[in-house]
Image: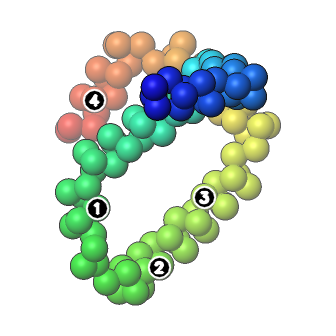
Amino acid sequence: MDLIDSIGKLLTPGFFDDVNSSIINLADLLVPPFANNTRTIVVAGTLLDDIQPLIDQFKDLDLNSLIKLIAPIVIKLSSLLDNAGKLLTTDIVNRIITLITKLSDLLTADLLSDISTLITQ
């Protein structure tokens, strides 16, 4: 009888309202975007397991030395990209494309063969 009394006390209108609300909320969790986001997180977690050996190799890395080593390269690369951005305007790119298009008509197999013969002599 104690089990039936306990179940009887549990089965109140509030209990059924809570169960209904929980089922609705659970259903909301099983549809996009939450389901997709959860799947992405789980996949990312398995990817972390796959790259853990790589991460372990970097744990003893001296970052200060690495930064000092690559800083000059990054500065030069940044300067190079900055200058390239200034030089490669839309107008210049269009001119280069036009020039290559015109030259492609002149560069025949015979001409390239003749040029190759001249270069190797």
Q: Determine if residue 13 is in view.
A: yes
Other-residue count near label 4 (Cα within 10 Å), few / some / many at <14 / 14–19 / ≥20 = few
Choose mark 2 or mark 1, whichever is in front: 1
Q: Which residue is mark 4?
A: 116
Mark 2: give few (<14), some (14-19) or many (20+) Cα within 10 Å.
few
Question: Which residue in the structure is indicated by mark 2?
Answer: 72
Of the image marks 1 and 4, the number of the one nearer the N terminus: 1
Mark linked to residue 81: 3
Q: Nearer the viewer, residue 3 or 53?
A: 3
Which mark is first along the chain, 3 or 2?
A: 2
Q: Position of residue 104 (x, y in %)?
A: 52, 18
| CA distance for labels 2 and 3 | 14 Å
- The structure residue drawn at horizontal position 59% and vertical position 66%, both measured from the top left corner, is 78
Task: Give the crowd class for mark 3: few <14, some 14-19, many >=20 residues within 10 Å.
Answer: few
Q: Can residue 36 be seen? A: no
> Which of these two is toward me, 23 or 100?
23
Q: Residue at x 64, y 54 (%)?
A: 84
First in sequence, mark 2 or 1: give its number: 1
Q: Helix or strand or loop: what does disc 4 sit on?
A: helix
Location of residue 33 by image quarter? top right
**Circle 2: residue type:** Pro
Name the image quarter holding residue 37. top right
Residue at the image point whose x is 27% and y is 38% from the top: 119
